[in-house]
Image (cartoon, rainbow, N blue to C red):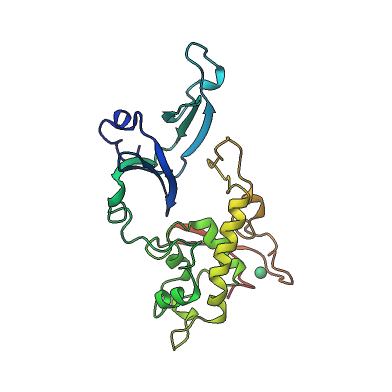
Amino acid sequence: MRVPFPPRFAARLQGRRVLDLRRRAKYLIADLDDEHSLVMHLGMSGSFRIDEATPVGFPRKSDKIAAHDHVVFHLDQEKRVVYNDPRRFGCMLLIATNEIDADKLFRGLGVEPLSDALDAALLARVFRGRAAPVKALLLDQRLIAGLGNIYVCEALHRAHISPLCAAGSLVTARGRPTAALARLPQAIKEVLTDALKAGGSSLRDHRQIDGSLGYFQHSFRVYDREGAACPTPGCTGSIARAVQSGRSTFYCPHCQK
Ligand SMILES: [Zn+2]
């Protein structure tokens, strides 16, 4: 994996109970009953699935270790949780639960996009005077934690903001959000909520825990739709593609200013 497993990883997990399961930014956190937490990141291609385990002595075909299964957690109740990661950019760490917030992975992370902390006033404070494109700032995990390329493209389209525009141009001289910026927090929350309801976006590797695909990719309005008609009602534009910081940006030059 991207970083080595913790020393004695399996031994330290054996017999532990999971007290809580939560998420911070792109990290999944399982708080254990020994005051440590299992911190997991899916990297580019990681996924978890839940298998029915086999009672001892009764091998079943479904219990086979598949290609790229790197970690198997054997739970009681005949279940096992399998971590699969073809590209091995994921990681698993053990961190003292009360030290997580101060850990170098977590300190300095921005607000959760679905929390009340993300609002237009916060964006105006951070964007004020910044010449960088708004898309680059939205992808900066020190500002908003957990937003990726797809959902930034989709949110900017819903808010009718060009990904290329300077972030500072969305703030008035008095430091207030413009009308466009005032739409952005709600657009971000709506895109994420819609995607969660659809089980996420399965472009390459993403799977739900039962192995099924997410289907939000069928609801993309701009992402990966270069040349298609813009879905904004009344807009006659078509979706364009640009490259920003080495990543593809999709947007409608007609209705995103
Ligand atoms: Zn448009």
Q: Is residue 135 above or below residue 24?
A: below
Residue 250 visible in the shown view: no
Relative to 121, say whether 33 is above or below.
Answer: above
Q: Residue 139 versus residue 96: which sits nearer the camera?
A: 96
Q: Quadrant of residue 230?
A: bottom right
Who is closer to the viewer here, 64 or 167? 64
Q: Quadrant of residue 190?
A: bottom right
Query: What residue is drawn where x is 45% and y is 71%?
Result: 133
Q: Residue furthest right?
A: 234
Quadrant where the C terminus lies?
bottom right
Residue 218 in the figure: left or right of residue 126: right
Counting from the top left corner in percent of width and height, residue 117 is at 45, 68
Q: Residue at position x 49%, y 37% from top?
A: 48
Q: Residue at 44% across / 88% down in the picture? A: 173
The percent coordinates of residue 188 (x first, y second) are 55, 64
Quick one: which residue is furthest to the left in this view?
A: 7
Q: Is residue 14 left or right of residue 241?
A: left
* Quarter that holds the N terminus: top left
Residue 90 in view in this figure: yes
Q: Position of residue 253 (x, y in %)?
A: 60, 71
Q: Position of residue 35 (x, y in %)?
A: 30, 43
